[in-house]
Amino acid sequence: MRGRPMSLRFLPLVLVAWIAFTGCRGPGIYVDARDYIAKHPPMPAKADRIRVGDVLNVQVFGEPTLSMPQVAVRPHGAISLPLLGEQPAAGLTPDELAKRLSRALDAYLKDARVTVILVSSTVVVHVIGEVSSAGKREFPRPVPILDVLAESGGLTQYANRKGIYLLRGSDRIRFDYYDLIRGSASVRNFLVESGDVLVVE
């Protein structure tokens, strides 16, 4: 008996793959911005706090091999140092971080003295999708999503106004363009962080 035509034999597999693909892209894997903000209320922005993307100068007095003239705060908020390894930094002031590092070094050094200086602070965001000018955007401080879109030339005529997503670590946060313009203050003033990826469908 002759088998079914090739295209028909593979149709079930194609349908399964299509459903899986579209299901993965559907809104189920994303968190609406309003729900995300309710669970993760933004911390007040303070100029003296260390942020992801900042570059620090960490000096251990009398220990040049343990000092780091330039060390970046990585996307997960930590810095990597000799001997101590990964150390949380984001959200602390330079003085608070210096004290924490001093205490951590007490296990290895006697009377360890550490100073931390903020060398540079830049928020780096990548923008992809239906904007006039996609690519990397740099800001001297965290800014709202609308500022990032404006720096990218705005949305194209093909952009999905309900398909704006912010990828932050393992979080995928969905925004509605009209909420960003005239929604609640918590949505309109939602600040991007260094390492975020903004996607416009």
Image: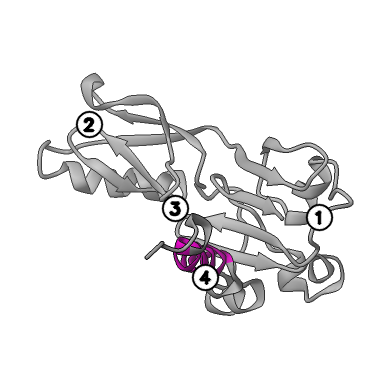
Q: Secondary structure at mark 2?
A: loop
Label 2 – label 3 distance at C-alpha = 20 Å
Give the residue displayed 60% in from the left and 65% down from the top: 173
Q: Disc 4 residue type? A: Ile
First of labels 1, 4 by sequence position? 4
Q: Secondary structure at mark 4?
A: helix
Label 1 – label 3 distance at C-alpha = 38 Å
Label 4 – label 3 distance at C-alpha = 32 Å
Boundaries of the magenta span: 9-25
Residue nearest the viewer, comparing 74 with 172 = 172
Residue 179 makes an appearance in the image: yes
> Which residue position holds label 1?
159
Considering every residue shown, the one lying at the far top of the view is: 64
First of labels 1, 2 by sequence position? 2
Splitting the image into 4 quarters, where does residue 163 fall? bottom right
Q: Disc 3 residue type? A: Leu
Instruction: Kindly indicate whether the residue at mark 3 contacts the one at mark 1 (C-beta within 8 angstroms).
Output: no
Considering every residue shown, the one lying at the far front of the view is: 1
Q: Is residue 36 left or right of residue 135?
A: left
Residues packed near mark 2 inside 10 Å, few (<14), some (14 to 19) or many (20 plus): few
> Which residue position holds label 2?
82
Q: Where residue 122 sits in the image (x, y, percent)?
A: 60, 37
Residue 69 counted in the magenta span: no
> Which residue position holds label 3?
92
> Which residue position holds label 4?
29
Q: Which mark, residue 38?
A: none
Q: Main secondary structure of the magenta part?
A: helix
Q: Where residue 93 sits in the image (x, y, percent)?
A: 47, 49
Q: Is residue 108 left or right of residue 89?
A: left
**Is 140 above or below relative to 51?**
above
Q: Disc 1 residue type? A: Ala
